[in-house]
Amino acid sequence: MTDFLSRGSYPQTRLRRLRRAPWIRDLVTEHRLTASDLIWPLFVLDGQGRSEPVTSLPGVSRLSIDRLLEEVSKAVDMGIRLIALFPVTPPDLKTPDGDEALNGNNLICRATQAIRQRFGDKIGVMCDVALDPYTSHGQDGLVRDGYVVNDETVAVLCQQAVVQAQAGADMIAPSDMMDGRIGAIRQQLDAHGFQQVLIMSYAAKYASAYYGPFRDAVGSKSSLGSGDKKTYQMQPSASDEAMHEVALDLAEGADIVMVKPGMPYLDIVSRVKREFHVPTAVYQVSGEYAMLAAAAQNGWLDLRACVLESLLAFKRAGADMILTYYALQAAQWLSE
Ligand code: PBG
């Protein structure tokens, strides 16, 4: 640790000199936020010309593919480099084993193809690997005797990843927290000729209460009922265990590791970056978005200032990239 006091102290040292005017503050700025740091999660809906607001995510709508393309076009124009897609699966297509996840013509595959076709390499498309948007019970994997089974789930996740890669996904993001899935998915992608498809692993994903609005958005909350995901997502009290998860995912071939949620877990973001020195992502999750949006709606917080501050804080903690529902809005603010 640097010995700050050996450099001199007051009155020789006055740190406020470095803060006196915008020009000097800009010169000594340590961390900057740009549109290219942001990843925009979007919810895809069946049908045509549809845009359905998510009540618990004010300002976020679920979009049919035609509407989705309009939003992606804005993201491209604003310099956002990657979008993350989540499906709103029609209830009649949800089954205990989530078979719709393996349908090469499902919502996610059609959306991915449409974006690929229209935008090429102007923006990346990331697809989530997990079964919760497709299962009637809302769990991320297959349930046998009341338990989300690991290895059988991993086999299905591998097929899901391949189906998404076949549709044109640039990046696969396993969010399920099964053991060993990164290595298995990497192997299957490679076996199908998808060596160039990246994997962003939800490596340190906590069993968090901040995911509520997301589950409203994809309609998995009612399916999940009183169930929880504590047998596979991490306990909020864990810190060393997060390093262990990250180490395993890197050893299995993850290109980018993610910490989720974001703001309550900045210490984890910081540790991951300092201990592994690899591309690190953080997810400002739906509950974090909702808190800021609700306070701003009540006139209690300045939305723009608080959102940009929260995103900058992720960069300071060590994140290279940030998933946030505010991505387009923040990119617009940054360009003003
Ligand atoms: C599902 C998944 C979740 C999120 C991303 N992928 C929810 C969950 O694990 O229940 C949460 C995102 C958010 O809250 O914004 N595998």
Image (spheres, rainbow, N blue to C red):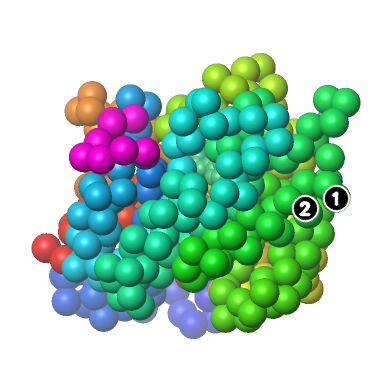
Q: Which residue is at 46% across, 43% downward?
A: 87
Can you tell which quarter of the image residue 225 is in? top right
Residue 151, labelled with which disc? 1
Residue 131 sits above or below residue 254 on the image: above
Residue 154, labelled with which disc? 2
Give the residue type that dot 1 points to.
Answer: Asp
Query: Which image quarter holds the N terminus?
Result: bottom right
- In reply to whether residue 51 is colored magenta, the answer given is yes
Residue 292, labelled with which disc? none
Q: Which residue is at 68% across, 47% downward?
A: 176
- In reply to whether residue 262 is colored magenta, the answer given is no
Q: Which residue is at 43% across, 32% downward?
A: 217
Is label 2's Cβ within 8 Å of ligand 1? no
Give the residue type that dot 2 points to.
Answer: Val
Tally of marks? 2
Q: Which residue is at 51% across, 57% downward?
A: 127
Q: Main secondary structure of the magenta part?
A: loop
Please tell me which residue lies in front, 267 or 117: 117
Res. 26 in view: yes
For the view shown, which residue lies furthest in the top direction? 226
- Residue 88 image point, x, y percent: 44, 37
Query: Which image quarter holds the C terminus?
Result: bottom left
For the view shown, which residue lies furthest in the left direction? 336
Q: Are marks 2 and 1 in contact (CB under 8 Å)?
A: yes
Res. 34 in view: no
- Residue 132 image point, x, y percent: 61, 37
Magenta highlight range: 46-54
